[in-house]
Amino acid sequence: MNYHQGQPVVTRGAALDQAQAVMILIHGRGASAESILTLVPEIDQPGFAYLAPQAAGDTWYPYRFLEPVERNEPYLSSALSVLSGLVEQLRGRGFSSEQIMLLGFSQGACLVAEWAARNPDYYGGVMILSGGLIGDKVSVKPGSLAGTPIFLGCSDIDGHIPQSRVEESAEILRQMGGDVTMRLYRGMGHTINQDEIDSVRRAMTVVVRNQNK
């Protein structure tokens, strides 16, 4: 079922034929591509293009990310294939994996984490903001993330994302070879804070610097 295919992809930043790097941004449940792109003015770096796909019905999959994977099918597979399609398009335009970053918030962060684990490679960065790996049970998957910078940030009392799943996800991604930074923020709401924004910006700076070597 191609549930999410054919939805718009909203762009910001540099044109792809001029960009040094690309960030794919994935919105949360009940949100939109336009809403996740409101982050761009806060994180924007010269040389970056930004792509934000839109979920059909504003939701990537219907049930909680902690449910058995099968319960969220076929929507989950359709959502993951949207990311795969975007990455393949970028590779077809000459971007290497290390020039590609992924960022997601909430349901979008869960989708980004799951996609990276299922498609391991060395990426410019994987920014997981209030999210974790998907499913009632999670485990190390085949392949290596080869030192990919991975950032997980979340409240320690988030009503949607249990602290235990953030910690479990960080450990699995670390075992898969990711260079993982995890930060739990005491008493924070289900939101994105300045430390997370600063962490994203630092990772982006490294990607551009590496392209200019």
Image (cartoon, rainbow, N blue to C red):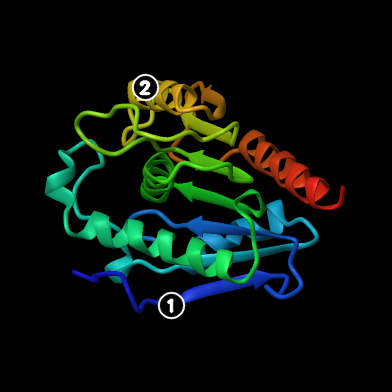
* Vertical relation: 50 (above or below) 70: below
Task: Please identify the quarter of the rendering in which residue 199 is found.
Answer: top right
Secondary structure of the residue carrying tag 1 is loop
Mark 1 residue type: Pro
**Residue 27 location in percent, x, y?**
44, 57
Residue that numbered label 1 is attached to: 8
**Residue 122 location in percent, x, y?**
58, 41
Residue toward you, 47 or 57: 47
Q: Residue at x 42, y 41 (%)?
A: 113
Q: Residue at x 34, y 61 (%)?
A: 81
**Residue 123 location in percent, x, y?**
59, 45
Residue that numbered label 2 is attached to: 168
> The N terminus is located in which quarter?
bottom left
Task: Please identify the quarter of the rendering in which residue 110 is found.
Answer: top left
Rate crowding at label 2 as few (under 14), some (14 to 19) or many (20 or more) other CA atoms within 10 Å: some
Secondary structure of the residue carrying tag 2 is helix
Rate crowding at label 1 as few (under 14), some (14 to 19) or many (20 or more) other CA atoms within 10 Å: few
Q: Earlier in the sequence, mark 2 or mark 1?
A: 1
In the image, taking residue 135 as reference, residue 16 lies left or right, namely right
* Label ID, residue 27: none
